[in-house]
Amino acid sequence: MSDPHLPSEAEIVERVQESPTIFTLRLRFTDPAEHAAYRFAPGQFNMLYLYGVGEVPISIVSDPGDEHLFDHTIRVVGRVTKGLAQLKTGDRLGIRGPYGRGWPLKEAEGRDVLIVTGGLGCAPTVSVINYVMRRRERFGQLVIIQGVKHANDLIWREQYERWSAVKDTQVLIAADVGVQLWPWHVGRITELFSMAQVESSRAVAMMCGPEGMMEVAVDHLCGRGVAENAIWLSMERSMHCAVGLCGHCQVGGKFVCKDGPVFNYPEIKTLFRAEGF
């Protein structure tokens, strides 16, 4: 990233429609030298700039070991994402990034890893799963817990099935509302914690999703003996500048764009439960 304020041009190499409102863009910088030099960590994000419309922060879901492309999975929720949804293979857009602090994957090596995701906001943890899967021998048990409101909201079903077949990997999925032939649990995501096959004293938990869900999940994990400093949260706020200047994403004295989006739970414990932050 030569200038954090200026977007670089990237080309859409592949577009995948994941669901009626969610799609994935596989991107490559048009400048070969810039693409070769690009580096990111799982949990970081880019600002995607649509010329004449605006820009929006989107998590990087691909593995940093993929030297050919980098991926963004996007849900259509506003003006910019609606515009991005109209782009096709070969179209170009602007990229600023990567920004923020990612997941503590080096510190997690040799330990059990518990991934907890609620709702449709699972992109920040997909990068973790991809990272661990490609370096499976470095980690202990991997438990992936995903909760959705309705069974039809679940995307990447084939990936979950493929992940569950990997040695020392457990996939637990819950839907508040099931459908016919739904193969997983029907109920709340918190009902899955008792099924997780991890050793609490050596587990590292990484989670994202609605803050109410994460707050309840933290209580469950701490109750099972997971240390507070072994719990990491990916926070969401309205990020406009991505470099800590505009203040839109401020949480207390911290900025989600540069101090996060991944935070160690003790860092934000008092703010996490305070109304207004």
Image: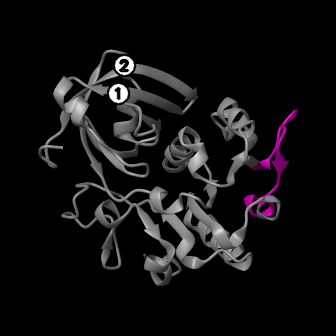
Instruction: Give the Cα separation between the discs numbered 1 and 2.
Output: 6 Å
Residue found farthest to the bottom: 270
Place of residue 28 in the rendered image (x, y in percent of width and height, measured from the top left): 30, 26
Tag 2: Cα neighbours inside 10 Å, few (<14), some, or many (≥20)?
Answer: some
Tag 1: Cα neighbours inside 10 Å, few (<14), some, or many (≥20)?
Answer: many
Q: Which residue is rendered at x = 81% and y = 65% of the image?
A: 194
Query: Which of the 4 image quadrants contains residue 67?
Result: top left
Q: Is residue 161 visible?
A: yes
Q: Is residue 88 above or below residue 157?
A: above
Position of 213 with respect to 57 (left or right) is: right
Secondary-structure class at tag 2 = strand
Position of 10 with respect to 42 (left or right) is: left
Q: Which residue is mark 1?
A: 27
Q: Which mark is residue 99?
A: none
Q: Which residue is rendered at x = 27% and y = 54% of the image?
A: 240
Q: Which residue is mark 2?
A: 13
Are circles 1 and 2 on residues that touch, CB within 8 Å? Answer: yes
